[in-house]
Each structure stands twice: as structure tokens, then as C-alpha cells.
Amino acid sequence: MKFQFWTIGKIHEPYVKAGVDLFTKRISNYYPVDWTIIPMPKNAGKLSEVELKKKEGDQITGALQKEDYLVLLDESGKQLSSEELAHFIQLRANDSIKTIVFLIGGAYGVSDAVKQRANYQWSLSKLVFPHQLVRLILSEQIYRACSINRHEKYHHS
């Protein structure tokens, strides 16, 4: 199984880059992992919210493979404990899923087409976080889940 982390926007800001790089490297001890930063559409500032979400959605759905398992990070998704996330990942591995794509949408969320394509919607919290911090939280929580599945001490250290 392989993890892909996709996000709309700009490269990692320096204040999160070190952490994202650290946890991404740690995840790679368990599974291959890649980050894809999808650039914002041209003239994004001139587009309406609906138009922007549609353009971003077209980029996302166009890049997904049919067999990709899409996990959409969305405030209306299901909240999971770290142990539940570990179990979720283990179940996907047991199902022989080849690639899990974790998607952090744009500033206004994602289009209905992306929501419909998503295999699972996951909410990190009821709180709203800046997209840059979501990248760090996502990478840390996926590493934590992997360490839980391997019965390593990180989760309780």
C-alpha cells in the first residue's frame, strides 16, 4: 500500500516544513509516501467560490486513478481517535488497497464531484486549522497510526 498526501495551495511554509518532512520520512519506514501540492487555478482570486471549487475539483478528479482510495479531509467527516485511524489503515491494507490518497481541499472546501468520489470523509477536529497546520497534523497522525499498528511505543511516549 502507498500513501499520497494531496493539498491545494502553496509549498510547505518553513514553520511546518521541518515537521512535515520528519513525519513523512518516518511514515516511509512503513509505507511509500508522497506529497503532491496541487497549484491553485490561474486567476483564482477572480473566480467565485463555486467556480474555484469546480476548477480545483476538475484537477483533483482528473489526477485520481480509478482504483485510488480517496480519503477527503473535511470538517463534516467522521472524527476518529488515533487507535480508530490505525484500525482504518489496517483494514485498507487488509483489503489490498494499493493507494490511499489523503486530500486536503482548498480554502472553500471541495466540489460536490470530489465529495461524491471520496471513499471516506475524515474530520481531524471540530476546530478549523490553517491548511499548513493540517499538513503537519495529518502527517503526524498517519505516522502515529502506523506506529500503533506495529505496537511501537511512540503513541505512549
Image (cartoon, grey):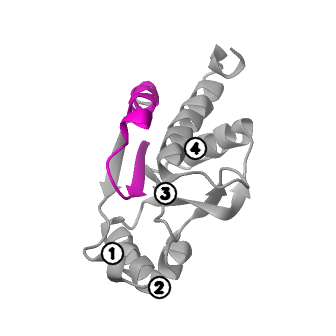
For disc 1, the neighbor class at 10 Å (few under 14, some 14 to 19, many from 20) is some
What amino acid is found at the position of numbered circle 3 in the picture? Answer: Ile
How far separated are the C-alphas under marks 4 and 1? 40 Å
Q: Name the disc covering residue 34, or none.
A: none
Q: Residue at x 61, y 40 (%)?
A: 90
Nearest the camera: 97 or 71? 71
Give the residue at mark 2. 50
**Going from the N terminus, do you reach mark 2 or mark 3 first?**
2
What amino acid is found at the position of numbered circle 4 in the picture? Answer: Asn
Q: Residue at x 42, y 26 (%)?
A: 22
How far separated are the C-alphas under marks 1 and 3? 17 Å
Nearest the camera: 64 or 46? 46
Q: Name the disc covering residue 94, or none.
A: 4
Drawn side of residue 6 relative to residue 133, left or right: left
Q: Name the element at disc 2.
A: helix
Give the residue at mark 3. 104
What amino acid is found at the position of numbered circle 1 in the picture? Answer: Ala
